[in-house]
Image (cartoon, rainbow, N blue to C red):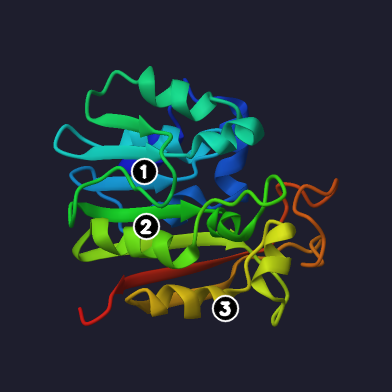
Amino acid sequence: MTDIEAILAAPDRSPEDRAMDGLRRASDMIDAAGLKPDQRILELEPGKGWFTDILLRLIGPKGHLTVQQPALLDGFFGKDARKLVQGAPAPNANYSDAPFTKLSAADATIDRVLWIQGPHEIWFEPKPGVTFGDPKAIFAEVKRVLKPNGMFFVVDNLAKSGTPQPEASQLHRSEPRLLEMIIEQAGFSLIHAELDWIVSDVDTLDAPTFTPGIHLRTSQHMQKYRLSGE
């Protein structure tokens, strides 16, 4: 049994988290993002903490995990991820509820920035006139904290090709090509993408992701970026 398999098979993991492993390709994400125990990892928008729990088990004594979820999202996800990180026995993990425009890491210190099912939030308005920040400013922050040769790893719910991103965000989705253009404008280069990272036969790509029958069964795309020029 590999280290990843041992982590996923840990007997104290909940049945709900185990079910998510297959639905969201946990082992494949760890492999695709090149996650290692000695890395400094920044996880953005952990939701309820499914992947956070895996990352806490993955980081070794020489690694570090920062989990960042703006306080504005507590109303959607609660404080499960916060409690998970703050209750972890490992001292090399911390939780931040700062906005995405102020990432909680020093310049050029992070090996991997992970944003799993979350980039669409940038254009989502939880309340009229309330946003999570300017996209350019947020992706500039990701660029700031990444080490040379670091990686920005993105997985998001898939929107139909050509859907304007503000419209896609109201469905909690992103349009891959538009997202790529915006991230590349911030100083990144796309090194790999998969439109069929997860393919769902019940997802029409044009309904909100929390729609009964689609929730947790969405089609998803994956993108990997390096800093431009590397």
* Residue lying at 37% horizontally and 21% vertically, measured from the top left: 86
Q: Residues within 10 Å of mark 3 (few under 14, many from 20)?
A: some
Question: Taking 2 as reference, is 213 left or right?
Answer: right
Q: Residues within 10 Å of mark 2 (few under 14, many from 20)?
A: few
Please give the label number shown on residue 4. Answer: 1
Between the C-alphas of marks 3 and 2, the distance is 26 Å
Question: Taking 38 as reference, is 42 left or right?
Answer: right
Name the residue tied to disc 2. Answer: 31
Between the C-alphas of marks 1 and 2, the distance is 9 Å
Give amino acid for label 1.
Answer: Ile
Visible in this render: residue 220? yes
* Residue lying at 82% horizontally and 60% vertically, measured from the top left: 207
Q: Which residue is outermost to the left?
A: 62
Q: Secondary structure at mark 1?
A: helix
Q: Quadrant of residue 206?
A: bottom right
Q: Which residue is outermost to the front?
A: 129
Q: Would you say the residues marked 1 and 3 are in contact, meaning their CB atoms lie under 8 Å apart?
A: no
Give whichever of 159, 3 is nearer the camera.
Answer: 159
| Whole-percent x, y for residue 58 in the image | 31, 38
The answer to which of marks 1 and 3 sits earlier in the sequence is 1
Give amino acid for label 2.
Answer: Asp
Mark whose residue sits in front, 1 or 3 = 3
* Residue lying at 61% horizontally and 60% vertically, measured from the top left: 123
Visible in this render: residue 6? no
Q: Quadrant of residue 159?
A: bottom right
Q: Secondary structure at mark 3?
A: helix
Please give the label number shown on residue 67. Answer: none
Please give the label number shown on residue 178. Answer: 3
Give amino acid for label 3.
Answer: Leu
| Whole-percent x, y for residue 90 in the image | 26, 23
The answer to which of marks 1 and 2 sits earlier in the sequence is 1
